[in-house]
Amino acid sequence: MKIEKSMIATIALASLATLAVSCKKEPVYVEPTPTPTPTPVVVAPPPDPGCDALSMTTFNGIFGTRAALEAPKMQTEGGVVCGNVPEGGKVSGPSFFLQQGKCYTVVANGLPNVTEIDVALVIDASAVGLPPAIVAMAATPLAVDSETGAMGTIGPKANCYKWALPIPAPVRVVVTARNGSGPIGAQMYSR
């Protein structure tokens, strides 16, 4: 009987040991939940508010005075291209067509806080139906000013810009505030 009790005790101990082993919890690895990376917020520059009435009046006076000297006997072509921009900002006018045989002058200016402007005459590559040769030319400005300071001119006086090709080309006037920020503008003249 002693053996029987000892055998029962051994079986009981073995069962308890097995039960203890099977109940023992293994450590469970739980992957940490990744913290979502916030999407960067891209802030677009505010839209160009254009020129206010005072700036427009100032540009009209400046361009009228300069036109008498730099675009003599020429008529205005379109309206004043004008905008209030940060340093490096640009304004561009609507497209218009250069015509063979016409003479063009662009007069541009920056107001007091703008100390250096650049003005360019560029082909409007977005115009529909341009011949491939014209589209290829659009990568380079047709004409740029060579002056330094807050005033710029393309084709002043007798050196006006002439379109040589027999077909009209859509172009835009683009003015850039290279140094300084504030109102910049331009006016196109032709004869």
Image (cartoon, helix red, strand yellow):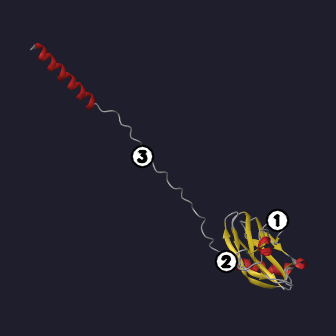
**Which residue position is annotated with label 1?**
148
> Of the residues tagged 1 and 2, which is closer to the observer?
1
Mark sitting earlier along the chain (1/2):
2
Which quadrant, please, contains the C terminus?
bottom right
Q: Amino acid at mark 2?
A: Leu
Name the residue at 19% across, 22% down. 13
**Which residue position is annotated with label 2?**
54
| Residue 190: mark in rendering | none
Which image quadrant for residue 156?
bottom right
**Which residue position is annotated with label 3?**
33
Q: Quick one: 14 or 180, which is closer to the camera?
A: 14
For disc 2, the neighbor class at 10 Å (few under 14, some 14 to 19, many from 20) is few
Which quadrant, please, contains the N terminus?
top left
> Of the residues tagged 2 and 3, which is closer to the observer?
3
Q: Where residue 42 appears, x then y in whole percent? A: 56, 60
Name the residue at 54% across, 56% down. 40
Q: Where residue 119 appears, x then y in whole percent? A: 78, 70
- Element carrying mark 3: loop
Which image quadrant for residue 61?
bottom right
Q: Where residue 5 appears, x then y in whole percent? A: 12, 17
Q: Quick one: 16 or 74, which is closer to the camera?
A: 16
Tell me how far mark 3 sits from mark 1, CA to CA. 59 Å
- Element carrying mark 1: loop
- Residues marked 3 and 1 touching at CB (< 8 Å): no
In the image, 147: left or right of 13?
A: right
Q: Amino acid at mark 1?
A: Thr
Q: Quick one: 57 or 3, which is closer to the camera?
A: 3
Which image quadrant for residue 182?
bottom right
For disc 1, the neighbor class at 10 Å (few under 14, some 14 to 19, many from 20) is few
